[in-house]
Image: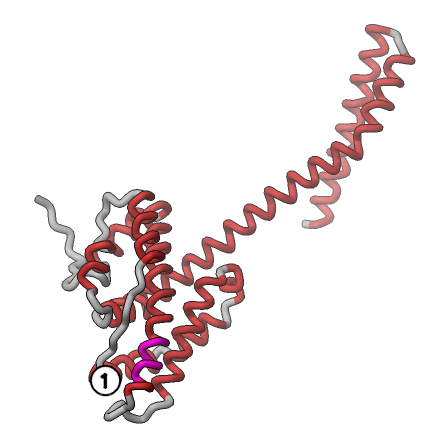
Amino acid sequence: MFKKLFTNKVWTGYALFAISLALYGLDFTIFGNLREISASFLGNLAFLPIYIIVVTLLFERVLRERERQSVMRKLNMVIGVFFSEFGNRLLKELSEQVVGSEELKNRLRMTGSWKKHDFDAALDYLRKSNQRISVDSDALPCLKQFMVGKRSFLLSLLENQNLLEHENFTDLLWAAFHIVEELDARESFDRIPPSDKEHINGDIKRVFGHLIREWVLYMQHLNKDYPYLFSLAVRLNPMIDSPDPVVYHD
């Protein structure tokens, strides 16, 4: 296969060289000015390194952009698996613990008609708001059971080299894994001191801040590139109290 490809390139080179000679010969036959042809040839030859530099830089830029897009497509697939297997439920669980969660849910009640400016407004709201988390001690055992059960899943994601291209999502995974370690280290949450509860709430707030932002960005990606996936994601929106996958028509 390689030998055949090499042979084809050699014959292509010969053909191009022959065409060049034929054109120069035609030029000489018609105009008969060898000095002008030589000057033109040397001029083009002098600019050849510049042509090579320009073409090489443009070609490398195109290749880097194609490679970056390929990596981002793979990364978005990983992010989709994350939300499907873990993130959506965690987002629903933690959003219930947000103080004044109704405003948050109303702001993120997405519809199929959302456009770029709607997502930008949602991200701007999240950036400016300071969400307060207050997880009741009675809710911690259930949260622990769910998150500790996903420890292996989180570790498998952290081993994915493509995630190095997405620093913010990597921060989300580390924050989530830290919560897993914190909850797993405590055998019981009965009569935990206020200082420890405040510490846990602070860690959960960190996770929630990363999680909600990455979720909005992922939904924006689906809306732009995969409308059919966005349609289902909207119906299963974890910000809705009773999500329903069924499509209803008026």
Q: Amino acid at mark 1?
A: Ser
Q: Quadrant of residue 135?
A: bottom left
State the residue lying farthest toward the top.
31
Residue 183, position as x, y percentages in the image:
34, 85
> Along the horizontal axis of the image, is 21 left or right of 71?
right
Give me the residue at 36% from left, 57% from top. 127
Relative to 164, residue 20 above or below: above
Element at label 1: helix
> Residue 250 colored magenta?
no
Residue 148, position as x, y percentages in the image:
34, 82
Give me the residue at 68% from left, 41% from top. 57
Relative to 178, residue 62 above or below: above
For the residue pair 210 and 78, the one nearer the viewer reads as: 210
Locate the C terminus by quadrant.
Answer: top left
Q: Quadrant of residue 245?
A: bottom left
According to the picture, the residue beneath numbered tag 1 turns out to be 137
Residue 42, position as x, y percentages in the image:
87, 23
The residue range painted magenta reads 197-202
Relative to 6, residue 214 above or below: below
